[in-house]
Image (tube, grey):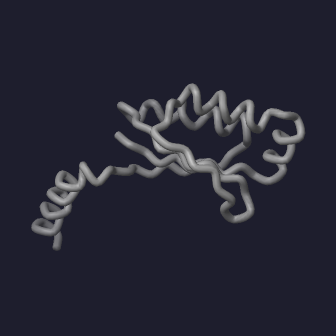
Amino acid sequence: MRLLLKASIPVEAGNEAAKSGKLAENLQAILEEQKPEAVYCIAENGTRTILVFLNIESAAELPKIAEPWFLAFNANIEVTPAFTPEEMPEVASAIEEAVKKYG
């Protein structure tokens, strides 16, 4: 299962991490451990925000993925399932089935 994990770091926690030299260090350690497909760093709603695309085998992996962000940065986490264009035929088929049944 592919996920988009959005980690938003509160300003105070981000500033503290930056001043202590832990911002880049912790970010690098977490990303090395999680081995994402892609990572983007943005500013969103006045916070440092990291967008991380990951593949996982099961939802049971979510605590292992989220806890480092919580502990290192006091981050707010959002996890959203994601799919690639190659997966679109399977997605379209599921949508068509739902339309037939509920539409």
Counting from the top left corner in percent of width and height, residue 35 is at 50, 30
Residue at 56% across / 49% down in the picture? 51
Number of marks drawn: 0
Residue, far bottom: 103
Instruction: Name above or below for residue 22 compared with residue 52.
Output: above
Residue, far left: 100
Specify the quadrant of the image occupied by residue 102.
bottom left
Counting from the top left corner in percent of width and height, residue 97 is at 13, 61
Counting from the top left corner in percent of width and height, residue 79 is at 49, 48
Q: Quadrant of the N terminus?
A: top left
Residue at 53% across / 30% down in the picture? 34
Q: Quadrant of the C terminus?
A: bottom left
Counting from the top left corner in percent of width and height, residue 23 is at 77, 38
Specify the quadrant of the image occupied by residue 66.
top right
Say which of 53 and 8 sits in front.
53
Lateral position of residue 19 relative to residue 101, left or right: right
Residue at 43% across / 31% down in the picture? 60
Instruction: Name above or below for residue 70 compared with residue 6.
Output: above
Say which of 36 and 68 sits in front.
36
Instruction: Name above or below for residue 25 compared with residue 47.
Output: above
Instruction: Name above or below for residue 30 compared with residue 83.
Output: above
Residue at 73% across / 57% down in the picture? 47
Lateral position of residue 83 relative to residue 72, left or right: left
